[in-house]
Amino acid sequence: MDFGRVTDDRLRELQGELPPECLLREPQRLEAFAADELKLPVLPELVVEAREARQVPPLLRWAARHRIPVTARGAGTGLSGGALPVHGGVLLSLARLDRILEIDPVNQTARVEPGVINAALQEAAARRGLFYPPDPSSWESSSLGGNIAHNAGGPRCVKYGVTRDWVMQLRVVLADGSEATLGPATRKGVVGYSLRDLVVGSEGTLAVVTQALLRLLPKPEATRTLLAFFPDLDAACAMVPAFSRAGITPSAIEFMDGEAIRIVRQELPGELPEACAGLLLLECDGREAAVEQDSLAIGEACLEGGALDVLVAEGGPRREKLWEVRRSLSRVTRRAFARKISEDIAVPLDRIGEYMRGARTIGREHDLLVLGYGHLGDGNIHVNVLATVDDSPTLQRMRACVDRLLALAVELGGTISGEHGVGVAKQPWIGLELPPTLLDLQKRIKQAWDPQGILNPGKIFDWQSDRARELFGAMREGEKSN
Ligand code: MLT
Ligand code: ZN
């Protein structure tokens, strides 16, 4: 793709449109925005740090005039490289647009700017007796704009659905700098195609979100957390269909396999049985009486399903500690191994056990450690390929192993990415899941929204471009401990 560069002349033109404090060019400032959680820095030519939403349209008009790429970025916590400016140009930071503009208890909505951190909205909503369900593991650091761009999931999605289910309306800036409001401010709305739903999960490739109206719920009266220890992973996996059959809907069904448990064993409660090779972290919420009943039913179902023991964690620090251990797995596994490739496949609920057995076999065949943890209730597994040696033959084996792990997910009727998006990291495998006709249809949608291809180029599809391919190779190598 033939993009324009940020020349001195063009920069002077932009300086006429935006205040100087928004334009960052010094190498140190650029470096601060160069990496996301994929951990391979790519320097932009210019960082534009928006201080007000009204600064975004003139930036995009300028970028469209010169065909300069614009990559929007929230908190930089993405795991697929979605915020990396792989074709250079402008990195548009929306982190300072971090105001919660309104919490409306009657309509049960929150109007927010994209830089608001997920936890900040959860806390503000809770102070008003309300509740925002989507809770990615990065909730304390990821921004709502990033959550929207990737249609983020999280533990509570098993009961409450993913980010898209909570977005009512979006204020966006289109690729030519014009503004639009997508979706009505109502619970229902069926006029035309849902462009709002298309923008959610589009990884910043269709429009830049400058404001969102999100749906809230009344805060559940009570929450109870349970830990169930199983002698093997198959028994733990079998609990998901068992809960479905029993009509129980926990608000979280997270799991760790034996290898994941081994890595965080010290952090887990002392009562963890030695023989435990599959752990479920379960939660239910709602009215106090219903929670009481549900937690009993969950506990009984687990024991019937072969659990070695079930513990109930009362609220407060103990519950927080359990969740902290679960959420830390991404970081901890990265630190514990010389190389790590982490995936986020999802399979239908009745194929989870089969997937995990297959994944272990694939790991053995490649002489690599493959472990799994994640959102079992959604069939969404963070399957990690890990190696203690950091050399090129090992990396090749790891790539071959990932090929098989992703292909297996698709063979079982699943997806190569349930949560983290395609970004750059998943591009080589997108064809496993999307046939050419659908890929072509998606590209034509992109073309209709962004004819010059300036919004976050190099993401989702055009990995064939030399630059993206070259970076991609380096990126997968960059997924080691740091
Ligand atoms: C998680 O669920 O912890 C996150 O999605 C990150 C990951 O571990 O892949
Ligand atoms: Zn996850």
Image: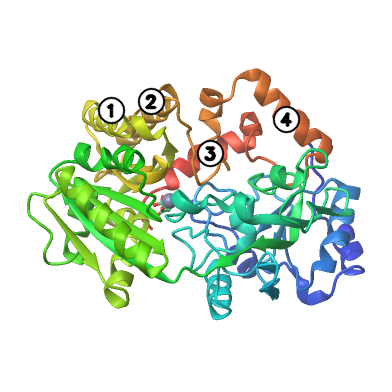
Q: Which residue is mark 4?
A: 443
Indicate the amino acid at tag 1. Answer: Gly
> Mark 3 is on which residue type?
Phe
Q: Which residue is mark 2?
A: 408
Give the side of residue 173 with respect to residue 335, left or right.
right
> Does label 4 or label 3 sit earlier along the sequence?
4
Ligand 1 has an atom within 8 Å of the beta carbon of the residue at disc 4: no
Q: Relative to 460, does residue 106 appear above or below in the rendering?
A: below
Q: Earlier in the sequence, mark 3 or mark 1?
A: 1
Depth check, front residue: 93 or 413: 413
- Placement of 330 over or under 292, stated as above or below: above
Q: Could you say where residue 380 lies in the image, as x and y percent from the top left? A: 41, 42
- Measure the C-alpha gap from mark 3 to mark 1: 27 Å
Say if mark 1 contacts mark 2, CB within 8 Å: yes
User: Which of the two discs, 1 and 2, labels the residue nearer the N terminus?
Assistant: 1
* Label 3 near ligand 1 (CB < 8 Å): no
- From the image, state whether disc 3 or disc 2 is nearer to you: 2
Q: Are marks 3 and 2 in contact (CB under 8 Å)?
A: no
Q: Secondary structure at mark 3?
A: helix
Front in this rendered view, residue 314 or 301: 301
